[in-house]
Image (tube, rainbow, N blue to C red):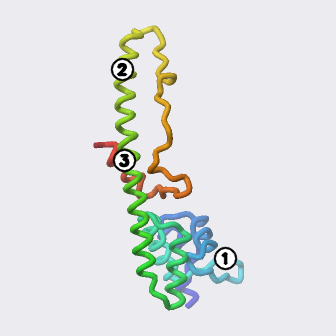
Amino acid sequence: MADTLLRIGDVARAAGVSPDTIRHYEKAGVIPRARRSDAGYRLYSPDALARVLLVRNGLQFGFSLRELARFLKAREHGTAPCRQVRATAEAILTRVEHRIVELEHARASIRETLTHWDARLAAAGDRAPARLLEALPTRQPSPACNASTPVRTAVPDRLARSVTQS
């Protein structure tokens, strides 16, 4: 059985993450605690690699480590957290939809600012300063943005690129 155990570097390399990430996942409770070799090296079962990949996919989707840890602990205790997973995913979707609205407003504002700046540049000529930064519009925070509910970046950033490219 000792042949099947993997060192932290092996798991990290196979999962495409750093050993620090593996240690962080272990501390967060999303992967089981590693056994230790006589020399003190962390040793993981091959199942740990599958768990790291599952966690990476969950994070990419938009779940937090805390949420994933809660779901996985429920599984380990014989509970099916499927409804919690579904409800959390719906909340993520709601945050993403709000973020998309914010990004669309930001895109429109930036376009409007660029048009305004083009006029300032044309009026200023080649040598005179146009004071573009001073002409930035003052904005109030969007009502869709709730500082107490952070938007996770993995999904929104991907969506941000597609929204801003259109």
Q: Position of residue 146 (x, y in %)?
A: 51, 53
Q: Is residue 46 left or right of residue 90?
A: right
For the view shown, which residue lies furthest in the front direction? 143
Disc nearer the start of the sequence (3/2): 2
* Viewer-side label of 1, 3: 3
Query: Distance between the Cα atoms at labels 1 and 2?
Result: 61 Å
Residue 120 position within the rendered picture, expressed as x and y whole percent measured from the top left: 40, 16
Q: Is residue 52 above or below residue 131?
A: below
Amino acid type, label 1: Tyr
Nearest-to-viewer mark from 1 and 2: 2
| Viewer-side label of 3, 2 | 2
Residue with the mark numbered 3: 161
Q: CA distance from mark 1 to mark 3?
A: 41 Å
Residue where numbered disc 1 is placed: 41
How many C-alpha atoms fall within 10 Å of the one at disc 2: few (<14), some, or many (≥20)?
A: some
Contact between labelled residues 2 and 3, with CB atoms less than 8 Å apart: no
Q: Vertically, is 132 above or below 142?
A: above
Q: Earlier in the sequence, mark 1 or mark 2?
A: 1
Q: Nearer the viewer, residue 40 or 84?
A: 84
Within-10-Å neighbours for mark 1: few <14, some 14–19, many 20+: few
Q: Residue at x 41, y 80 (%)?
A: 83
Kind of residue sitting beneath label 2: Asp
Q: Quadrant of residue 116?
A: top left
Q: Nearer the viewer, residue 6 or 148?
A: 148
On the rendered image, what quadrant is the C terminus found in?
A: top left
Residue that mark 2 sits on: 118
Q: Residue furthest right?
A: 39
Tag 2 secondary structure: helix
Q: Quadrant of the N terminus?
A: bottom right
